[in-house]
Amino acid sequence: MKLIRHIIMAVAVCLMAAGSHSAAQNKFEVRKVDFDKIKSITQDPKARFYYPKLIQSFKSNDTVMNFEAYRDLYYGYIFQEDYNPFRESEYGKVVESLYYKQPHSRAECDSIEKYAELSLDDNIFDLDQMKFYIYVLKEKKKYARAAVRQYRLDRLIAAIMSSGKGTKDDPWVVICPEHEYNIVNFLGYVATDHQELDDGKLDYIAVKPKDGKENVKGFYFDVSRMMQVAMLKFPDK
C-alpha cells in the first residue's frame, strides 16, 4: 500500500506541475537540447545514462528515474538503430478503433490492453497508446500499474516541454511529428492548422482554445534534427 500511495502522490505532483502552459514551465529548467552531449552519454557503456540502462529502467515498474534521465531517454532515442520518427504500429489502429467505441465491455478492455501493450512494444514513445493503455488499466481497476504508466507519460511530456517555450525563437524539440499534437492536446488546445517553416526545420501548429483557456494562436516545434536523421535513414521518403 505504501508503494501505491508513493506512486499516486508522485503522479499527482507531476500533473500539477504540468497542468497548464505557464505552470508547467515554472516547474523545471527550460534549456536547449545538446544532442552531441546526449549522444556521447547514451552511447557510452560506462555512463550512468547508457541507453540500454535507460530503457531497462524505463520499462521497470518503479519511478526511480530522475528528470535528466527522461530527457536523455527521449532525445537519446534518435541515435538508436531502430529509431524511425514515422513508425506506425498495426496494433495501434486496432486500439484506436476499440477505444473510441465507448463504453467498453470486459472483453473489449482486454483487447485494448493486449494491443496497446503490443503497440508500445513496437514504439515505446507512442504517447497516444500510452494514454489508451492507462485508460484501460484504470477501467480494469489496475490502479498501481496505471499510476506507473501515468508517471512515465507525464515525465516524457515534461521532458519535451523542458526543451523550449513553444515560441518561434525558442521552440519545443520533438523526435516524432505526432508529439506536436500530443503537446497541444495536453495543454488543452485543439490543433486547427499545420505549417512547415524554415525549409522544413520548424513546424507551427495553430490552435484554438478550449473552455477556460487563454487565447493562444499557436506553438512552434523544432523538427530539424528529426528530419535530418529521417532523410539519412529514409532518403526515398
Image (cartoon, rainbow, N blue to C red):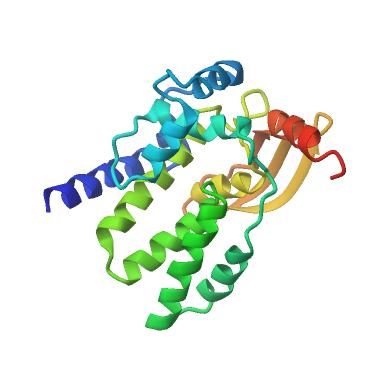
**Residue 18 makes an appearance in the image:** no
Image height of 163 relative to 14, above or below: above
| Viewer-nearest residue: 222 or 22 | 222
Residue drawn at 43 percent across, 18 percent down = 46
Residue 28: which quarter of the image? Answer: top left
Task: Residue 65: give x, y in percent of width and height.
Answer: 34, 33
Count of labels shown? 0
Q: Is residue 95 left or right of residue 155?
A: right
Q: Quadrant of the C terminus?
A: top right
Residue 96: which quarter of the image? Answer: bottom right
Q: Is residue 201 left or right of residue 56?
A: right
Task: Residue 11: give x, y in percent of width and height.
Answer: 30, 46
Residue 202: which quarter of the image? Answer: top right
| Viewer-nearest residue: 195 or 90 | 90
| Viewer-nearest residue: 76 or 159 | 76
Task: Residue 211: give x, y in percent of width and height.
Answer: 49, 57
Residue drawn at 55 percent across, 16 percent down = 37
Q: Is residue 129 left or right of residue 69?
A: right
Residue drawn at 56 percent across, 50 percent down = 123
Q: Quadrant of the N terminus?
A: bottom left
Q: Is residue 137 left or right of residue 90?
A: left
Image height of 68 relative to 104, above or below: above
**Residue 6 makes an appearance in the image:** yes
Which residue is outermost to the right? 236
Task: Residue 120: give x, y in percent of width and height.
Answer: 51, 55
Which residue is outermost to the left? 2
Residue drawn at 38 percent across, 30 percent down = 67
